[in-house]
Image (spheres, helix red, strand yellow):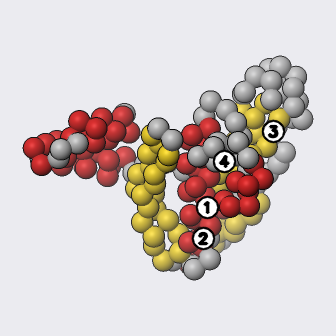
Amino acid sequence: MAMLCGGNGEVCYSKYGSYPLRGKYCREMAMRILLACIESHANRYKRYIVLVLSVQMDFYVRVFVRIKTSTSAMKNTPLKLLYVYQCIGCDSFHLQPLARTVSKNMSVRYLPGFGPAIPEECSDCGKKYNMGGPIWSTPIHDQDWVTSILADVKSMKERYRAFNRISAVLTSINQ
């Protein structure tokens, strides 16, 4: 977890293919780096991931994904990734998509994203930016699935010894 939260950026890059940034949101960034890495590995086999649930607790992150096969859907992967520019002075940040699509005559072309997305210096404090990523940019939960599972767990409360913890996690995700 320390590596994914920016403790050792070059090791994170060598293992996960993404550069982390330290910040108040480092645990969410760790989760998004992990998802981008899983998607990258799935793409090597003409597959892609559909995220079901992701949880960050204590000193770990857990992600639950479905792996699907589709060459055409796999082309959408660059649209799910972005880079983060974080100011070294005030922790403000900006996001830059990795790619974009252009529709023309019933066909879709995938093109690189536009850049640079930000000025060289922060407009709030005048300091420079650190750049991290690429990271996963789409939602990190399937909200309908979480709502459904929470209802199921509550209806069978007596079957779960860890009901309070499960319920608390799912409720916090569901909000």
Q: Earlier in the sequence, mark 2 or mark 3?
A: 2
Disc 2 vs disc 1: Cβ atoms closer than 8 Å? yes
- Under mark 1, the amino acid is Cys
| Viewer-nearest residue: 167 or 137 | 167
Marks 3/4: CA distance?
A: 17 Å
Q: Which residue is mark 2?
A: 41
Marks 2/4: CA distance?
A: 19 Å
Marks 2/1: CA distance?
A: 6 Å
Q: Residue at x 70, y 42 (%)?
A: 6
Q: Which residue is mark 4?
A: 3
Residue 80 image point, x, y percent: 60, 56
- Under mark 2, the amino acid is His
Above/below status of 10 relative to 118: below
- Marking on residue 37: 1
Q: Nearer the viewer, mark 1 or mark 4?
A: 4
Task: Characterize the local packing of mark 3: few (<14), some (14-19) or many (20 or more) Cα atoms within 10 angstroms.
Answer: some
